[in-house]
Image (spheres, helix red, strand yellow):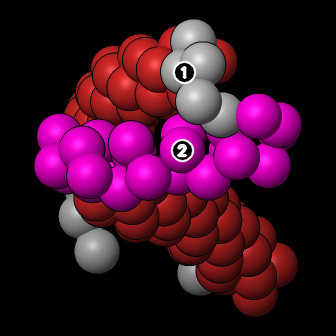
Amino acid sequence: MMQMSHYPSAIAQAAQRVNELDSQLMAVQHQINRFEGNADRAAAFDVDLKNDAQRKARRFEVLLLNHEYQKAMDAQIQLTMEKANAIAHLEYLRNQLSVAKLEARLAIAQQLTDYESRELVGL
């Protein structure tokens, strides 16, 4: 366990990492939305498609063939997992700080109790 004075900076760094991953996730989501919008547009303006089921199938086909879309989806999955791990690490650090504070309080209370006991005995 690290010293209590080091926890604030470690917690800040962990929170910053969560924010960075969140930003990267938003960028990937924007890219995915753009790919999906392009697929929707391609399916919507295809005059050979007769109904919504055919348009949905065409949209799926366009997205399936788009390797950049597949990479973006993989990146989204990876970043989501990294963000979950970063959040878990942040909570771990926060909980460690809470434990360190409780241990410090306990040590102070024990010292005070020992001091008062010695005074009562007359040492």
Disc 2 target residue = 58
Residue beneath the point at 81% across and 78% down: 120
Q: Where's residue 64, x and y in %?
A: 36, 56
Dividing the picture into quadrants, the one containing residue 35 is: top left
Residue annotated with mark 1: 46
Residue 53 visible in the displayed image: yes
Q: Nearer the viewer, mark 1 or mark 2?
A: 1
Q: Earlier in the sequence, mark 1 or mark 2?
A: 1
Label pair 1/2, CB-CB below 8 angstroms = yes
Residue drawn 54% across the image and 40% down it: 59
Q: Residues within 10 Å of mark 2 (few under 14, many from 20)?
A: some
Out of 88 and 25, give the one closest to the viewer. Answer: 25
Q: Which amino acid is tagged 1?
A: Asp
| Dot 2: element | helix
119 vs 104: above or below: below
Q: Where is residue 45 in the image (x, y as percent from the top left)?
A: 57, 12
State the residue in front, 91 or 102: 91
Q: Give the range drawn in magenta.
A: 50-73
- Residue 19 in the image, given as x and y percentages of width and height: 39, 26
Where is residue 9, by image quadrant?
top left
Checking the image for residue 57, the label placed there is: none
